[in-house]
């Protein structure tokens, strides 16, 4: 029962070796060509791209046509304080995050085209600014997370999570910043699955306070709203408020919060409202009908920072390590107990555990003789724990975990986001 190719599996010795010898240098053209030829030996690509050097080079050529427009439409992200202020509706006017619209319609910004699966073409030359892929369009919370994670980077909008992963793998972007969980809405399962399917490394995390607003076209009253659209997570985070504010409105899912706002503006929809950020209101010319409508004032989304190379784990600051594993067959429920005890006995705290269907083998059928046939669901488990892979206790815990599991992969060992909770918006903020 092997869910990933051997290249994905964790061989502890080589993992530690890789971590110790890996050197991440800022992406430049020279580095691109060196790594391209190295990668061509072991990579296989999504969408049927082969693994030869020529294939690799042509796959590096993905996304080109759209990159030009993405570069135009992407915003240069600012520092943390500005980003969080903008997200939370306290934009001070000095923040210029506005995109260069692809066209202008009635004085309003034209549609920003995020990267799509069909846009895979040549990599751009991009100087030294770090390019950070996120899912959504400008004004999305993910864009703010990208700005917090990498101030002064260039944010590259992508239409799907999968495209953001591919953008990094194909050198269109240098990093991806993607949401994995929210304090109200829970886990974003799609990204857990994609972490396993792709081979990027987690190099950091950022937590963003999410302050939602109800947005509509100027002059529209809340009692005229018959439909509210937004990202499913945002809708889940504002369910209680929406029941009070727009009790008769239909609730509909949209790709992301800012795209919902943009859709209302572009189509001049006077009966529809969006749940999105104050920055989205500003960008797409909408009014804020209600501010701070998240059902809990301390609404926080956790994002992962992803890169092609792992970072070197350290011990001089708090680190977290994320792993994924599957139990060996016939080990029953005791595997989870044994794995958890490997951490507990070493005083390593777990911060998150998530289970997902085992993609290669979601069901195991056991013929129980005369009684009948049992069908077990099979799972892969994702665990985050508070220790660095540079610590002996973490290495020992994983060596033990490896004994109970059919595969084990370290997704990354990275600094924890230690932003004080006091910087999160309070009830009356
Ligand atoms: O739609 C957006 O604005 C996003 O950035 C996506 C997303 C998510 O996927 O959870 C990010 C943060 C919020 O929790 C709501 C939505």
Image: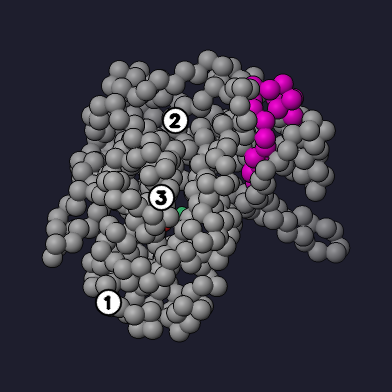
Q: In which quarter of the image is residue 153?
A: top left
Q: In which quarter of the image is residue 272?
A: bottom left
Q: Foreground mark, 2 or 1?
A: 1
Instruction: Pick the residue in front: 169 or 59.
Output: 169
Disc 2 residue crowd, few under 14, some 14–19, many 20+, Cα 10 Å: many
Residues at marks 1 and 3, CA–CA distance in whole angstroms:
25 Å
Highlighted magenta segment, given as a residue range = 380-397
**In this view, 168 is above or below 240:** above
Using the rendered image of the protein, determine whether residue 149 is visible from the camera's viewpoint: yes
Instruction: Pick the residue in front: 187 or 143.
Output: 143
Residue 85 marker = 3
Q: How far from the left and from the top, in percent, is residue 233?
A: 50, 61
* Mark 1 or mark 3: whose residue is earlier in sequence: 3
**In the image, is 246 to the left or to the right of 300?**
left
Q: Give the residue number, with chain letter if any, for mark 2.
A: 308
Q: In which quarter of the image is ligand 1?
A: bottom left
- Quarter of the picture containing the N terminus is top right
Q: Give the residue number, with chain letter if any, for mark 1.
A: 219
Residues at marks 2 and 1, CA–CA distance in whole angstroms:
47 Å
């Amino acid at each position: 029962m092997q869910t990933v190719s051997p290249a994905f599996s964790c061989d502890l010795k080589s993992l530690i070796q890789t971590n110790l010898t890996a050197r991440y240098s800022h992406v430049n053209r020279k580095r691109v060509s060196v790594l391209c030829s190295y990668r061509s030996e072991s990579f296989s690509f999504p969408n049927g791209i082969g693994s030869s050097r020529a294939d690799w080079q042509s796959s590096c050529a993905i996304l080109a046509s759209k990159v030009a427009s993405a570069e135009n439409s992407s915003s240069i992200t600012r520092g943390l304080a500005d980003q969080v202020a903008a997200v939370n509706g306290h934009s001070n006017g000095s923040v210029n995050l506005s995109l260069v619209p692809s066209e202008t319609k009635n004085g309003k910004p034209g549609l920003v085209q995020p990267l799509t699966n069909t846009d895979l073409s040549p990599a751009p030359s991009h100087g030294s600014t770090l390019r950070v892929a996120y899912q959504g369009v400008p004004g999305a919370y993910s864009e703010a997370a990208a700005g917090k994670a990498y101030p002064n980077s260039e944010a590259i909008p992508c239409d799907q999570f999968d495209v953001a992963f591919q953008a990094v793998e194909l050198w269109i972007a240098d990093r991806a910043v993607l949401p994995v969980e929210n304090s109200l809405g829970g886990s974003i399962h799609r990204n857990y699955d994609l972490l396993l399917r792709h081979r990027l490394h987690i190099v950091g995390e950022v937590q963003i306070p999410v302050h939602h607003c109800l947005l509509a076209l100027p002059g529209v009253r809340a009692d005229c709203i018959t439909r509210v659209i937004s990202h499913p997570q945002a809708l889940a985070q504002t369910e209680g408020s929406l029941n009070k504010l727009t009790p008769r409105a239909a609730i509909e899912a949209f790709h992301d919060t800012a795209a919902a706002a943009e859709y209302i503006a572009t189509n001049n929809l006077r009966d529809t409202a969006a749940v999105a950020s104050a920055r989205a209101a500003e960008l797409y010319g909408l009014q804020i009908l209600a501010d701070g409508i998240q059902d809990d004032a301390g609404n926080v989304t956790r994002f992962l920072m992803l890169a092609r190379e792992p970072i070197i784990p350290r011990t001089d600051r708090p680190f977290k390590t994320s792993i994924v594993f599957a139990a060996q067959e016939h080990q029953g429920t005791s595997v989870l107990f044994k794995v958890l005890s490997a951490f507990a006995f070493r005083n390593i705290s777990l911060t998150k555990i998530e289970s997902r269907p085992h993609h290669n083998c979601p069901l195991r059928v056991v013929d129980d003789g005369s009684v009948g046939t049992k069908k077990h669901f099979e799972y892969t488990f994702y665990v985050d724990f508070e220790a660095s892979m540079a610590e002996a206790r973490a290495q020992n815990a994983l060596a033990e975990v490896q004994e109970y599991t059919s595969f084990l992969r370290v997704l990354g060992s990275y600094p924890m986001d230690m932003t004080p909770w006091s910087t999160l918006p309070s009830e009356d903020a």
